Image (cartoon, rainbow, N blue to C red):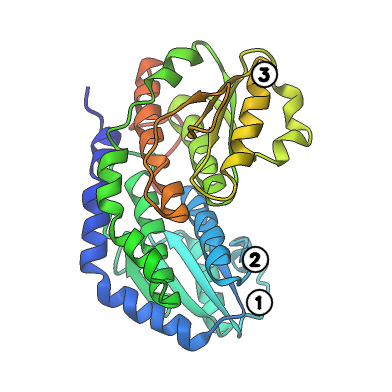
Amino acid sequence: MLTNMRREIDEIPEAAARLLDQSRLAVKATGAALRAKDPAFLVTIARGSSDHAALFLKYAIELSTGRPVASLGPSLASIYGAKMHLQGAASIAISQSGKSPDIVAMAEAATKAGAVTIALTNTLPSPISEASTHPLDILAGPEIAVAATKSYVNSIVAGLAILGEWTEDAALQRAVADLPVQFAKAVTLDWQALADELGEAESLFVLGRGPALAIASEAALKFKETSGMHAEAYSAAEVLHGPVALVEKRFPVIGLAARDAAEGSVTGILDSLSAKGALAFVTSTEARSARVLPFVETGHPITDALTLILPFYGFVESWSRSRGLNPDAPVALKKVTETR
């Protein structure tokens, strides 16, 4: 059975190419606005998969610019009515539907507080675009499956394109422009070896550091959404501060390592857990005892981390079906969640 989720995963390379082609002017304008503002710090506004996209962009921005990025709780505006002081800041709100009341309220508050406000959305026009000074259509196209895939990826691609324009970083710009090609490779990778070993497992950890931690967070959410499986994302460093006590023999642990400064650290921790009997998998050829999952090398540490989500999406869609579930319609979930 070809699910909507599988179709949408396969559409990611095309969706990214469409975004990069059709949003050039909006990307340039937004990057120019950030250069003009020269923000002392940035804030993000999002929930769910969109918040994981925001976490990825947080690391990318901090690594590229040295500007701190903080996540704002949307309820600060919608419930508490807090007045934020954001005159020297920029904000990035991410919402596929563009109409979640609490996200819109926080974006409006950021605009009123004097920030340069960016909205990444799959729906224009929409309340979030009207609440922001620089709305950008991520052009993922219709996404029918409840679990977000191509909208998650395109939100990050849009953010990275803006970051490259803002910083005028030629290496990042080239890497972003090459993403559709890299995605086309990544979407074909097979993680069946992981599925073969999971068996009847009901709980697991997904580890990462830096931008790959945001991918780990998204992966853990997708395990819960599509398969009803308990999964927790941790920094590969933080897992040793308590959570490791749960790792018994054949407890599954997936390490998402990019070709960046943290690769050795993540891989070393997965190897140590493997030595203790854990069922350890990692996206790195540096592993000595952990099992290696296939990955794509993009030549840039930030985009390298992003491509890790594509083979995972393919795996988790298939894993969900193997458990007799429908990944298009997870139990008790709906496509648009309108929290206040």
- Residue at left offset 66%, top offset 77%: 84
Nearer the observer, 233 or 145: 233
Where on the picture, by quarter, is residue 173? bottom left
Horizontal side, residue 23 vs residue 324: left or right: left
For the question of whether residue 97 can be seen, the reply is no
User: If you read the primary sequence from the N terminus, does the residue marked by circle 2 or circle 1 appear first?
Assistant: 2
- Residue at left offset 21%, top offset 65%: 21
The Cα–Cα distance between marks 2 and 1, rounded to whole angstroms, is: 9 Å
Mark number displayed over residue 95? none
Is disc 2 placed on a helix, strand or loop? helix
Residue 113 drawn above or below residue 292: below
Identity of the amino acid at label 3? Ala
Give the residue number, with chain letter if any, for mark 3. 275
Q: Kindly check if marks 2 and 1 are in contact, taking CB atoms under 8 A apart as contact.
A: yes
Nearer the observer, 6 or 255: 255
The Cα–Cα distance between marks 1 and 3, rounded to whole angstroms, is: 49 Å
User: If you read the primary sequence from the N terminus, does the residue marked by circle 1 or circle 3 appear first?
Assistant: 1
For the question of whether residue 81 can be seen, the reply is yes
Identity of the amino acid at label 1? Met
